[in-house]
Image (cartoon, rainbow, N blue to C red):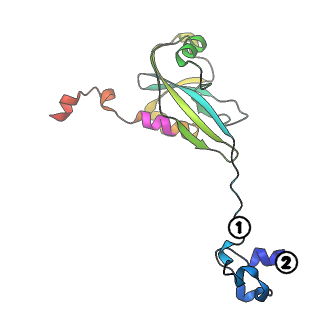
Protein backbone atom coordinates (compact mmCIF):
# COMPACT_ATOMS: atom_id res chain seq x y z
CA UNK A 1 0.00 0.00 0.00
CA UNK A 2 2.86 2.40 0.81
CA UNK A 3 4.36 1.76 -2.64
CA UNK A 4 1.11 3.06 -4.17
CA UNK A 5 1.58 6.34 -2.34
CA UNK A 6 5.24 6.57 -3.33
CA UNK A 7 4.78 5.55 -6.97
CA UNK A 8 1.25 6.62 -8.00
CA UNK A 9 -0.14 9.24 -5.59
CA UNK A 10 2.25 12.02 -6.51
CA UNK A 11 1.32 15.64 -5.85
CA UNK A 12 2.45 16.97 -9.22
CA UNK A 13 1.51 14.07 -11.53
CA UNK A 14 -0.79 11.53 -9.88
CA UNK A 15 -1.31 8.31 -11.87
CA UNK A 16 -4.95 7.75 -10.91
CA UNK A 17 -5.64 5.69 -14.06
CA UNK A 18 -3.13 3.06 -12.89
CA UNK A 19 -4.29 2.99 -9.25
CA UNK A 20 -6.19 -0.15 -8.15
CA UNK A 21 -8.09 1.81 -5.44
CA UNK A 22 -8.98 4.86 -7.59
CA UNK A 23 -12.75 4.14 -7.41
CA UNK A 24 -12.66 4.40 -3.58
CA UNK A 25 -10.13 7.28 -3.36
CA UNK A 26 -11.53 10.09 -1.21
CA UNK A 27 -9.08 12.64 -2.67
CA UNK A 28 -10.23 11.81 -6.21
CA UNK A 29 -13.95 11.75 -5.32
CA UNK A 30 -13.75 15.16 -3.55
CA UNK A 31 -11.47 16.69 -6.25
CA UNK A 32 -8.63 17.27 -3.76
CA UNK A 33 -5.90 15.25 -5.50
CA UNK A 34 -3.51 18.23 -5.43
CA UNK A 35 -3.78 18.45 -1.62
CA UNK A 36 -2.19 15.05 -1.05
CA UNK A 37 0.34 14.08 0.01
CA UNK A 38 0.68 17.17 2.18
CA UNK A 39 4.14 18.77 2.19
CA UNK A 40 6.22 18.31 5.30
CA UNK A 41 6.17 21.37 7.52
CA UNK A 42 9.38 23.40 7.34
CA UNK A 43 11.63 22.80 10.30
CA UNK A 44 12.53 25.96 12.18
CA UNK A 45 16.30 26.22 12.25
CA UNK A 46 18.20 27.47 15.28
CA UNK A 47 19.76 30.90 14.89
CA UNK A 48 23.23 32.07 15.90
CA UNK A 49 24.74 35.53 15.78
CA UNK A 50 28.39 36.62 15.75
CA UNK A 51 30.32 39.77 15.01
CA UNK A 52 33.56 39.89 13.01
CA UNK A 53 36.39 42.40 13.03
CA UNK A 54 37.01 43.73 9.56
CA UNK A 55 40.38 45.32 10.27
CA UNK A 56 41.69 47.26 7.28
CA UNK A 57 45.10 48.85 6.90
CA UNK A 58 45.48 50.54 3.55
CA UNK A 59 44.05 48.08 1.01
CA UNK A 60 44.77 45.00 3.17
CA UNK A 61 42.54 43.09 5.57
CA UNK A 62 43.57 41.07 8.63
CA UNK A 63 42.63 37.35 8.66
CA UNK A 64 43.04 34.43 11.07
CA UNK A 65 43.08 30.73 10.20
CA UNK A 66 40.09 28.95 11.73
CA UNK A 67 40.58 25.78 13.80
CA UNK A 68 40.52 22.56 11.75
CA UNK A 69 37.39 21.29 13.53
CA UNK A 70 34.06 23.08 13.43
CA UNK A 71 32.42 25.60 11.16
CA UNK A 72 34.62 26.68 8.23
CA UNK A 73 37.45 24.46 9.53
CA UNK A 74 40.91 25.44 8.29
CA UNK A 75 39.73 28.43 6.23
CA UNK A 76 40.98 31.98 6.65
CA UNK A 77 38.41 34.31 8.19
CA UNK A 78 37.93 37.58 10.01
CA UNK A 79 38.49 37.48 13.79
CA UNK A 80 35.26 36.81 15.70
CA UNK A 81 33.81 38.51 18.73
CA UNK A 82 30.50 38.45 20.54
CA UNK A 83 27.83 40.72 19.11
CA UNK A 84 27.80 43.04 22.14
CA UNK A 85 31.58 43.36 22.53
CA UNK A 86 33.30 46.67 21.81
CA UNK A 87 35.42 46.33 18.66
CA UNK A 88 37.84 49.08 19.65
CA UNK A 89 38.57 47.44 23.03
CA UNK A 90 39.08 44.02 21.41
CA UNK A 91 41.50 45.47 18.84
CA UNK A 92 43.50 47.08 21.64
CA UNK A 93 43.44 44.16 24.10
CA UNK A 94 43.85 41.24 21.70
CA UNK A 95 46.08 42.72 19.01
CA UNK A 96 47.51 45.89 20.63
CA UNK A 97 46.27 47.68 17.53
CA UNK A 98 45.35 51.33 17.43
CA UNK A 99 42.31 51.98 15.28
CA UNK A 100 40.96 55.23 13.91
CA UNK A 101 37.29 54.27 13.57
CA UNK A 102 35.00 51.36 14.37
CA UNK A 103 31.81 51.29 12.28
CA UNK A 104 29.12 48.61 12.21
CA UNK A 105 28.33 47.51 8.66
CA UNK A 106 25.00 45.93 7.58
CA UNK A 107 24.36 42.40 8.85
CA UNK A 108 24.97 39.39 6.62
CA UNK A 109 22.52 36.48 6.78
CA UNK A 110 23.93 33.04 5.96
CA UNK A 111 22.17 29.68 6.02
CA UNK A 112 23.61 26.29 6.88
CA UNK A 113 21.75 22.99 6.79
CA UNK A 114 21.31 22.90 10.57
CA UNK A 115 21.22 26.60 11.58
CA UNK A 116 21.14 30.16 10.31
CA UNK A 117 23.85 32.68 11.10
CA UNK A 118 23.77 36.46 11.35
CA UNK A 119 27.20 38.03 10.91
CA UNK A 120 27.68 41.63 12.05
CA UNK A 121 30.85 43.08 10.47
CA UNK A 122 32.64 45.76 12.50
CA UNK A 123 34.89 47.81 10.23
CA UNK A 124 38.02 48.94 12.08
CA UNK A 125 40.49 51.17 10.23
CA UNK A 126 43.93 50.38 11.68
CA UNK A 127 46.21 53.31 12.39
CA UNK A 128 49.04 51.39 14.09
CA UNK A 129 49.76 47.66 14.11
CA UNK A 130 52.45 46.23 16.42
CA UNK A 131 55.08 43.95 14.85
CA UNK A 132 54.47 41.25 17.49
CA UNK A 133 50.91 40.75 16.18
CA UNK A 134 52.35 39.01 13.08
CA UNK A 135 51.93 35.52 14.51
CA UNK A 136 51.52 32.16 12.74
CA UNK A 137 47.91 31.64 11.69
CA UNK A 138 47.44 35.36 10.97
CA UNK A 139 47.96 37.34 7.78
CA UNK A 140 47.29 40.63 6.05
CA UNK A 141 45.62 39.88 2.73
CA UNK A 142 45.56 42.49 -0.04
CA UNK A 143 41.93 43.10 -1.01
CA UNK A 144 42.74 42.45 -4.68
CA UNK A 145 43.75 38.85 -3.71
CA UNK A 146 40.39 37.98 -2.08
CA UNK A 147 39.05 36.03 -5.09
CA UNK A 148 41.73 33.32 -4.82
CA UNK A 149 41.80 33.07 -1.02
CA UNK A 150 40.38 30.14 0.99
CA UNK A 151 37.60 32.07 2.73
CA UNK A 152 34.06 31.19 3.89
CA UNK A 153 31.51 32.29 1.27
CA UNK A 154 29.87 35.14 3.26
CA UNK A 155 33.28 36.53 4.29
CA UNK A 156 34.56 36.33 0.71
CA UNK A 157 31.48 38.22 -0.54
CA UNK A 158 31.95 40.92 2.10
CA UNK A 159 35.62 41.34 1.19
CA UNK A 160 34.89 41.34 -2.55
CA UNK A 161 32.46 44.21 -1.94
CA UNK A 162 35.17 46.02 0.06
CA UNK A 163 37.66 45.45 -2.78
CA UNK A 164 35.47 47.23 -5.34
CA UNK A 165 36.91 50.65 -6.19
CA UNK A 166 35.26 53.50 -4.35
CA UNK A 167 35.68 57.19 -5.07
CA UNK A 168 37.38 57.77 -1.71
CA UNK A 169 39.88 54.93 -2.21
CA UNK A 170 40.81 56.21 -5.68
CA UNK A 171 41.66 59.62 -4.29
CA UNK A 172 39.18 61.35 -6.58
CA UNK A 173 37.11 64.23 -5.39
CA UNK A 174 33.51 64.53 -6.57
CA UNK A 175 34.33 67.83 -8.28
CA UNK A 176 37.05 66.14 -10.38
CA UNK A 177 34.66 63.40 -11.49
CA UNK A 178 31.88 65.86 -12.34
CA UNK A 179 34.06 67.85 -14.78
Question: What residue is at 65 percent from the left and 75 percent from the top?
Answer: 34
Q: What whole-number distance in Å separates the C-alpha atoms at marks 2 and 1?
A: 17 Å
Dominant secondary structure of the magenta stretch?
helix
Q: Position of residue 132 (x, y in %)?
A: 57, 11
Residue to which mark 1 is pinned? 38
Quadrant occupied by the N terminus: bottom right
Question: What residue is at 59 percent from the left and 31 percent from the top?
Answer: 76
Q: Position of residue 52 (x, y in %)?
A: 56, 27
In the displayed structure, 153 sits above or below 41; it is above
**Viewer-closest of 27 and 75:** 27
**Viewer-closest of 42 and 114:** 42
Residue to which mark 2 is pinned? 1
Left or right: residue 121 versus residue 112 is left
Left or right: residue 158 versus residue 33 is left
Label 2 crowd bin: few (<14), some (14–19), many (20+), radius 10 Å: few
Numbered range of the magenta stretch: 157-162
**In terms of secondary structure, where does tag 2 sit?**
loop
Which label sits in the foreground, 2 or 1? 1
Quadrant occupied by the C terminus: top left
Q: Work out which residue is located at the far left of the displayed protein and give it.
A: 179
Label 1 crowd bin: few (<14), some (14–19), many (20+), radius 10 Å: few
Q: Position of residue 177 (x, y in %)?
A: 20, 33
Q: Work out which residue is located at the far front of the displayed protein and give it.
A: 30
Question: What residue is at 75 percent from the left and 81 percent from the top?
Answer: 26
Left or right: residue 177 versus residue 95 is left
Residue 23 in magenta?
no
Q: Work out which residue is located at the far right of the displayed protein and give it.
A: 1
Amino acid sequence: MMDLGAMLCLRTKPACALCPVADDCVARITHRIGDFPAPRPKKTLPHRAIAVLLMEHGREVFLERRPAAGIWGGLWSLPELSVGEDAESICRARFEAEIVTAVTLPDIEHGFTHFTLTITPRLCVVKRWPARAQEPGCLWLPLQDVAGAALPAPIKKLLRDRAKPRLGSLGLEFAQVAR
